[in-house]
Amino acid sequence: MSIRRVSSGNGARLRLLFLDIATDDLKLRKASERKIAKGPYAELFRKRLDLKMDELQVKWAAQGCLPEPTGYNGIIIGGSSKDPVEGKEQAWMMRVYEFIEETVNKAVPLLGVCGGHQFIARALGAKVIYNPRGREFGTLPVTLTAQGARDPLFTEVPDRFFAQLTHRCIVEEIQRDWKLLASSDMCTIQAVAINERTRIVQFHPEFSANNMIALAKFSKKSLIDEGLTTSSRFQRFLSFIRETNQAAKVLTNFLTHFVVPNLKRTKRTRRSV
């Protein structure tokens, strides 16, 4: 059954929240959206998910009050330029942690991507640190664990797949009752099942190769300063960024296996009232 058919009828419609935690710096936001996303960051998710405008609501986390989680069938938290590392957290980030806790406590389906992966892990008791091996950047292989291969988030995703990656921080270790779903050479904790309805992934399923190339150009100085490339080798560095749609399947799987069942539960609840 398609998302469209599930979201129609009986007064219930698909209502997804994208919580934008990208930055609290308006100048940086405008520059990155113009040069990397080629528009609002949330649109990368909307297009990957083939959602109508009214099916994905966007909230900027740094701008005031956060909404009630139960007003949505599911929530996605995207990437961030802010690092949820102890001692570097701002007041608005602490509010996001509280929102995450509330979302999980109220059993609303939740997906964290890259920065969202780290924010959710941090909010729920894990430690986030700077990777001692440095930044992971590029189109790189990710390998599913045995549990990951069975998890609905990775339905029809190969046991070893390529994804777009860029991050300095990592989740250092997971809680005992969490399940490790995927790893990469530089980052053991690439994907986690936190509970029945909460999933986090360190990679970027929303990014295309063009987004990654644009990001590399936008961040060229930082990439050189961090030792990932040099001015003379930069074009060769870019040549290793490739198109891959394997990781994008995670987004549609989140809709199909997590959000849609929640929408159906909402319909049944309304019928019983």
Image (cartoon, rainbow, N blue to C red):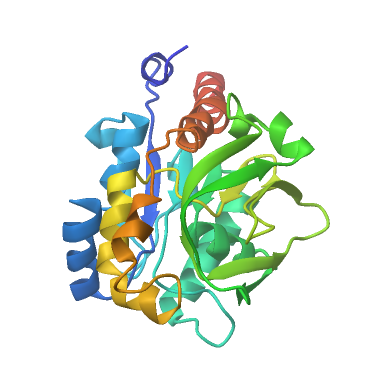
Of residue 139 and residue 238, the one placed in the foreground of this image is 238
Q: Residue at x 60, y 34 (%)?
A: 153
Residue 31, horizontal then vertical, whole percent: 18, 67
Of residue 8 and residue 186, the one placed in the foreground of this image is 186
- Furthest-front residue in view? 232
- Furthest-right residue in view? 176
Q: Does residue 187 sit above or below 106 in this rendering?
A: below
Q: Residue at x 34, y 58 (%)?
A: 236
Q: Residue at x 38, y 43 (%)?
A: 242
Residue 57 in sight in this render: no
Q: Does residue 129 sit above or below 56 in this rendering?
A: below
Toward which corner of the image does residue 258 lie, by quadrant?
A: top right
Q: Does residue 146 sit above or below 183 in this rendering?
A: above
Residue 26, horizontal then vertical, whole percent: 21, 72
Q: How many marks?
A: 0
Residue 4, horizontal then vertical, whole percent: 36, 18
Q: Residue at x 53, y 46 (%)?
A: 111
Residue 165 in sight in this render: yes
Of residue 262 and residue 235, the one placed in the foreground of this image is 235
Residue 93, horizontal then vertical, whole percent: 46, 73
